[in-house]
Amino acid sequence: MKRNNFPDNATCPLCGGTIENGTTTRTISIETAILIVKDVPAGICDLCGEEWFMLDVSKQLDELADEMRAKGSQLEILPYPANRMAEVA
């Protein structure tokens, strides 16, 4: 099952490798806090390992960071929201 919207044979602009659809764990530093999000849909270069995110995924990560900031948490480890996975599948 595709979990992202990167086209087949997308080329990495950094090294020329092939961007493959997959998932990753994203760590976000927010002031003095840390947010870790697991199973984030991403395009991952098969040569350099650079991770690329579609705009809707980036926006969802921003929303999760904003929610964490509002709660005043210092550390959160979350799965990527399941309702978002269905939208990028």
Image (cartoon, rainbow, N blue to C red):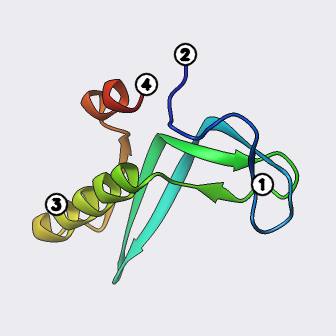
Mark carried by residue 89: 4
Q: Earlier in the sequence, mark 3 or mark 4?
A: 3
- Specify whether residue 76 is in view: no
Up the image or down, 58 lies above or below 78; here it is below
Q: Secondary structure at mark 3?
A: helix
Q: Secondary structure at mark 4?
A: loop
Spatial distance from mark 3 to mark 1, Cα to Cα? Answer: 29 Å
Spatial distance from mark 3 to mark 4, Cα to Cα? Answer: 24 Å
Q: Residue at x 12, y 64 (%)?
A: 71
| Residue hosting label 3 | 67
Q: Residue at x 55, y 16 (%)?
A: 1
Percent of width and height locating residue 8: 69, 34
Percent of width and height locating residue 82: 30, 28
Spatial distance from mark 2 to mark 3, Cα to Cα? Answer: 29 Å
Between disc 1 and disc 4, the foreground one is 4
Instruction: Using a 10 Å C-alpha cutoff, classify the residue at mark 4 as few (fewer than 14 neighbours), some (14 to 19) or many (20 or more).
Output: few
Q: Secondary structure at mark 1?
A: loop
| Residue hosting label 2 | 1
Q: Please indicate whether residue 56 sits to the left or right of residue 29 in the image.
A: left
Q: Are marks 4 and 2 in contact (CB under 8 Å)?
A: yes
Q: Nearer the viewer, residue 79 or 5?
A: 5
Spatial distance from mark 1 to mark 2, Cα to Cα? Answer: 21 Å
- Specify whether residue 18 is in view: yes
Mark carried by residue 49: 1
